Amino acid sequence: MNRLLIALPLLLAANAGTAAGSDIAKAIVEEKCHLCHGTEGEASSAIYPRLAGQNKEYLVKQLKNFRDGIRKSDTMNEMAKGLTDEQIGALADYFSSKPARTHRVRDKALAAVGYYIFHKGNRFSGIPACKSCHGDYGEGTEKLPRLAGQHKRYVADQLRAFNERVRTNDNAVMHTIASKLTELEIEAVALYVSGLKEQPPKDSP
């Protein structure tokens, strides 16, 4: 009984903290995020990343990098300016808790090329398998992004940005890889990951 009496206030405090964090995130989403990323992180356009289901620590890092000017983007630098660590944590909790979505892939032949690069790489040009860092199903890790279900155009744009060093953070490894990808491979990988789910796609080659 004593343990229950001690644990109950702690549980209530934790729930109150979670609710407060959710309220903080919702207010910021309504003020700043929803026009580009949607209220549920679904993204209003394929040029913006889907944030729903993205890994929490990765979101925290990217928002801090935008806030601190490490990752350059006129829009996002302005949006993230002034955000506190608490607000960034609340936003990361909010978006990472939303259900991830996926795209229907119609060009199966192009997706098959993406499947090969993602799972096996290209030994002829020295490209490692994408899954070695981003996971078998594009789920990523705490520090690496979830790619599964991301918009094809956004993934392709980021790969080109890494190649051209326009992307100003996380560039060391990704430039080495992206600089070896052909346009066909970029489009194929981007298409393939856009249709990835948490389990193997039924129509995988």
Image (cartoon, rainbow, N blue to C red):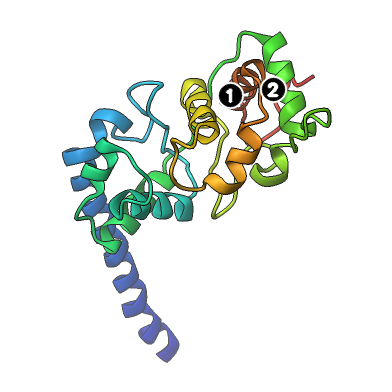
Query: Does dot 2 land on a helix, a strand or a loop?
Result: helix
Q: Amino acid at mark 1?
A: Ala
The first of marks 2 and 1 along the sequence is: 2
- Which residue is located at x 73 percent, y 24 percent? 115
Q: Is 118 displayed left or right of 8 in the figure?
A: right
Report the quarter where the N terminus lies.
bottom left
Q: Estimate how packed mark 2 is, as few (under 14), some (14 to 19) or many (20 or more) residues with alpha carbons within 10 Å.
A: many
The picture quadrant where one finds residue 117 is top right
* Placement of 4 over or under 163, stated as above or below: below
Q: Where in the figure is residue 35, as x and y percent of width and height?
A: 23, 29
Would residue 52 appear left or right of 17 to someone viewing this image? right
From what the image shows, is residue 31 above or below residue 25?
above
Between 200 and 55, the residue placed more toward the observer is 55
Whether the residues at callouts 2 and 1 have beta carbons within 8 Å, the answer is yes
- Mark 2 residue type: Gly
What's the mark number on residue 104?
none
List the residue tagged with mark 2: 114
C-alpha distance separating marks 2 and 1: 7 Å
Q: How many marks?
A: 2
Q: Nearer the viewer, residue 134 or 24?
A: 134
Q: Residue at x 47, y 43 (%)?
A: 54
Q: Residue placed at 58% from the left, 39% from the top? A: 175
Disc 1 element:
helix
Specify whether residue 203 is in view.
no
The answer to whether one can see residue 202 in this image is yes
Q: Which residue is mark 1?
A: 190
Percent coordinates x, y for residue 113 in the rendering: 73, 18
Q: Mark 1 packing: few (<14 Cα in 10 Å), some, or many (20+)?
A: many
* Residue drawn at point x = 79 percent, y = 19 percent: 205
Along the line of sight, the residue nearer the viewer: 134 or 72: 72
Residue that lies at the very extreme toward the right in this rendered image: 123
Name the foreground residue: 22 vs 141.
141
